[in-house]
Image (cartoon, rainbow, N blue to C red):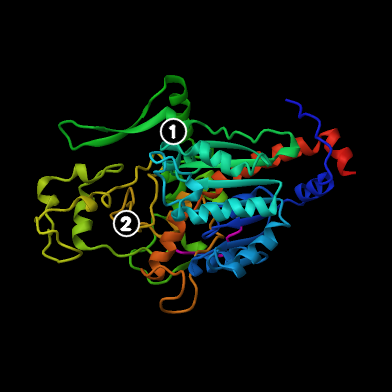
Amino acid sequence: MTPRRARASPDAAELFDRASRGTVVDLFAGAGGISEGFRQAGFKIIAGSDYDPDATATYALNFPGADVVTGDIRQSTIKQRILSAAKDASIVVGGPPCQAFSQVRNFSRMIDDPRNSLYREFVDVISAARPVAFLMENVTGIDELGMREQMLSDLSIGGAYKVRGQVVNAADFGVPQTRKRLLFIGLREELSTEPPELRGTRATDAVSLARFNGVAPAHYKIVAQTPLDGKNVLLALKDKEDKSVVSAADAISDLAGLPVGNRLDELPCSELAPAATAYQREMRKGAGKTITNVQVPRINVDTAIRLESIPPGGNHRDLPDELLERYISGQKWGQDNGSGKLSRRHFYAYRRLHPGIWAWTLTTKGDCVYHYKHARALSVREFARLQSFPDRFTFTTDPRVGQIEGRHSEGAAHSRYRQVGNAVPPLLAKAAAQAIRASLRKALSSEGLKTLAA
């Protein structure tokens, strides 16, 4: 569709200039998943902010040319630094936490709830900085509770932006992990161009992992949900050179030999198995001679025993009754609920990857999923691979010891898992960035806009 002729505007030259810069500011950036995706799409990251000093330490390490702002955006000095950068940026991106979803019943607006103050700050930055485009990411729970229309209205900034909201699944964009997210993409109204709709492979609708019972212990198999598309996705999953649909084994099989309990968090790449898939080769690009974040944590004896009874793709449902006892080996660990059995919260810990399909959604916990072949947890690097972070991207923490403002209290090792688990997968962000770039190029090629900007 040919864009309509842009309306005459005294800001057209400024709009054209900002759009041409290709610069990005990332709010609530965490470790930098969205920034990494935009960087891979050819954008320049000029600033990123977050409250967590460990996350911003990772951000600063991986985006050395960016201005990294650590602190609470609700504080005036922090806000001013962010606004200063955002007013020069082509695009503002971010994933502000939204803690209060249930405003439907009392008809109050989501943006007015004090628990959503960080979301309000994101909207405020867009309103004040007026970037050419923006991307806001959030959880799908907002959409499920009917908040989309409110957010579309908030983010339109009184008609200054055309905004599209859409639910996407990361596994449909070459990420070896199912992860649904709600994305809002906004373009300045003067561009006279509709925000892009992301279209992935739809692989997650075409196949699924099914549990089969029989005489032998239960096993898990990938089955087609739709005949033609399912067949094509199954073929893509088996093709080690196809990066459009990536399985867990395609992502991390070359890291299977990482030693358990090794205290060194860095290994020479020469000690790794050769890359076995196109995805692994892509992830290794630019990593140099060493690979980081490769520590594999030890697990207790009971967990190891249980994992041996869980098939690839399985979970606590595959455990026999005797392995549901709270303590098996006699070793005491964790909290005891007094029932003598595993509690419900333990059930989510006993899950094993299936090598032939993408991973479950990773959480911030290092024990949220276990290796498909070995009875062990995953390293931060394997978490990062399943999130589509390249091996050159290193996760770290602020070198200061103790509890400092914004730091989570679980310690450095947990912080690295948290940073990866909270991130937007870079390949998903890259797809969004490429779509935004295409829309901007289309708008900027409009004769009307070029004439106004001349």
Alpha carbon distance from label 2 to label 1? 24 Å
Q: Residue extending furthest bottom?
A: 401
Compare residues 337 and 210 and report the one nearer the observer.
337
Secondary structure of residue under mark 1: helix
Q: Is residue 107 visible?
A: yes
Q: Earlier in the sequence, mark 2 or mark 1?
A: 1
Q: From the viewer's side, name the closer residue of 62 and 122.
A: 122
Mark 2 lies on a secondary structure that is: loop
Name the dominant secondary structure of the magenta segment.
loop
Question: Which residues, given as a range, are shown in magenta?
Answer: 286-293
Pointer 1: residues within 10 angstroms few (<14), some, or many (20+)? some
Where does residue 67 sit, x and y in percent of width and height? 65, 66
Give the x, y percent position of residue 294: 43, 63
Residue 289 colored in magenta in the image = yes
Going 55% across and 37% down the picture, which residue do you hit? 165
Kind of residue at disc 2 = Asp
| Badge 1 amino acid | Thr
Q: Is residue 392 left or right of residue 41?
A: left
**In this rendering, position of residue 360 left or right of residue 437:** left
Q: Is residue 167 visible?
A: no
Q: CB atoms at circles 2 and 1 under 8 Å apart?
A: no
Name which residue lies at 34% across and 42% down: 354
Q: Quadrant of the N terminus?
A: top right
**Residue occupied by mark 1:** 204
Indicate which disc residue 367 carries: 2
- Residue 271 is one of the magenta-drawn residues: no
Quadrant occupied by the C terminus: top right
Q: Residue at x 56, y 63 (%)?
A: 73
Q: Position of residue 133 (x, y in %)?
A: 67, 45
Q: Could you say which quadrant of the image residue 191 lies in?
A: top right
